[in-house]
């Protein structure tokens, strides 16, 4: 199966903003987090200097050059063919960067080949992304980290606009999901700074339905926005430290026929999630 085939799978989540308006999304990326607070928090958690980085759902590759500055290698993975082409063009002058068609659920990468997998507002949106977490744990080296970065819909004002636009989105459910899957959570306040109000309006126009975008314009007096992010990190364990099993757990482990399958004991200890 080629990377292009993998990328056509049904796990692809439509991203109308960047799919339909890649130019405006580029303006949005340039305006986001101008002080680099998210990169700083990520670097504090996982130092990727001299390491192998994967940016999954890399879109047009906006973040690839930043990783390429210090990483040993950076691989962008993206399922939407026009964005694969844009990302490849962006990194063509960088020896250590490549872009491959693929999906978070089926990365065209060997086992234990990456130290950091970065996913920014891509695929890992909460319940339903378990296949991507399992795949990331396969691709990470022991001790490596999956960093999921998304917007914090609980924070004023951007989060209020998000919740108005997506009434069924429940931030607490999403956060509880990542916590249950063993992710840490850090919240990061950033400033988005736009060159002018026309750019701000264009960006709000690709992120929200017209009525919410108009409200967001009315509620933003100048050209900056305060936007909070969530940074969730989960490491692939070096090994699993097993507690002394009780008699019933020992009995369950004896019933495990397949050594590749953690079986009931694995279920009880949550090992299936760790794979
Ligand atoms: C909102 S964009 C973010 C792009 C990029 N991370 C950035 O920050 O500029 C979300 C991206 O996720 C991609 N995507 C959708 N489904 C995916 C999947 N199953 N695996 C990996 N990426 C996916 C989309 O094609 C899109 O490029």
Image (cartoon, rainbow, N blue to C red):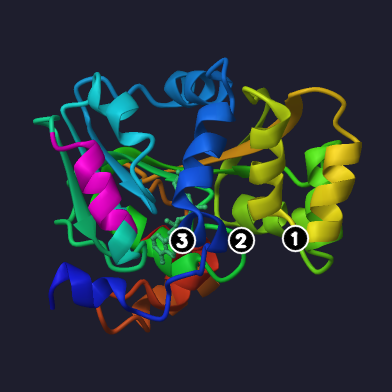
Q: Which residue is mark 2?
A: 126
- Separation of residues labelled 1 and 3 (CA atoms): 27 Å
Rendered view: 149 above or below 196: below
Instruction: Residue at 74%, 23% (x, y): give it.
Output: 224
The residue under label 3 is 19
Magenta span: chief secondary structure:
helix
Q: Nearer the viewer, residue 100 or 28?
A: 28
The mark nearer the N terminus, 1 or 3, is 3
Q: Provide the secondary structure element on which disc 1 rests.
A: helix
Q: Nearer the viewer, mark 1 or mark 3?
A: 3
Does the rendering let one see residue 259? Answer: no
Instruction: Give x and y (percent) for residue 216.
Output: 84, 43
Residue 36 painted magenta: no
| Residue 14 image point, x, y percent | 51, 69
Q: Residue at x 67, y 25 (%)?
A: 196
Q: Is the residue at mark 3 in contact range of ligand 1, meaning its CB lies under 8 Å from it? A: yes
- Quarter of the image with the N terminus is bottom left
What is the x, y in percent for residue 50? 19, 22
Q: Residues within 10 Å of mark 2 (few under 14, many from 20)?
A: some
Q: Nearer the viewer, residue 66 or 131?
A: 66
Crowding at label 3, few (<14), some or many (≥20) Cα neighbours within 10 Å?
some
Provide the residue span drawn in magenta: 83-92
Is the residue under label 1 in contact with that under label 2 (CB below 8 Å)?
yes
Of circles 3 and 2, which is in front? Answer: 3
User: Within the image, what quadrant is residue 185 found in?
Assistant: top right
Q: CA distance from mark 2 to mark 1?
A: 8 Å
Classify residue 158 by image quadrant.
top right
Task: Residue at 36% x, 46% y: name it.
Answer: 236
Label number found at residue 173? 1
- Judge left or right: residue 98 versus residue 10: left
Which quadrant does ligand 1 occupy? bottom left
Mark closer to the chain start, 3 or 2? 3
């Amino acid at each position: 199966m080629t990377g292009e085939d993998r990328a056509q799978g049904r796990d692809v989540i439509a991203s109308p903003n960047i799919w339909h308006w890649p130019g405006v999304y580029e303006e949005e990326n340039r305006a986001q987090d101008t002080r680099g607070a998210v990169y700083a928090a990520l670097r504090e958690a996982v130092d990727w200097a001299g390491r192998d980085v994967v940016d999954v759902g890399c879109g047009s590759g906006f973040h690839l050059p930043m990783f390429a500055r210090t990483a040993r290698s950076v691989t962008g993975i993206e399922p939407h063919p026009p964005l694969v082409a844009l990302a490849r063009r962006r990194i063509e002058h960088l020896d250590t960067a490549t872009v491959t068609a693929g999906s978070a659920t089926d990365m065209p990468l060997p086992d234990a080949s990456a130290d950091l997998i970065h996913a920014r507002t891509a695929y890992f949106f909460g319940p339903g992304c378990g296949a991507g977490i399992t795949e990331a744990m396969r691709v990470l080296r022991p001790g490596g980290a999956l960093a999921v970065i998304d917007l914090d819909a609980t924070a004023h004002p951007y989060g209020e606009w998000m919740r108005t636009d997506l009434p069924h989105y429940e931030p607490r459910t999403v956060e509880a999901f990542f916590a249950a899957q063993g992710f840490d959570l850090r919240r990061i306040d950033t400033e988005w700074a736009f060159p002018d109000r026309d750019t701000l309006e264009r960006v709000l126009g690709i992120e929200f339905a017209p009525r919410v975008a108009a409200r967001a314009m009315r509620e933003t007096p100048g050209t900056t926005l305060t936007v909070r992010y969530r940074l969730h990190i989960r490491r692939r364990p070096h090994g699993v430290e097993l507690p002394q099993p009780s008699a019933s757990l020992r009995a369950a482990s004896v019933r495990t026929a397949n050594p590749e399958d953690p079986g009931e004991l694995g279920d009880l200890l949550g090992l299936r999630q760790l794979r």
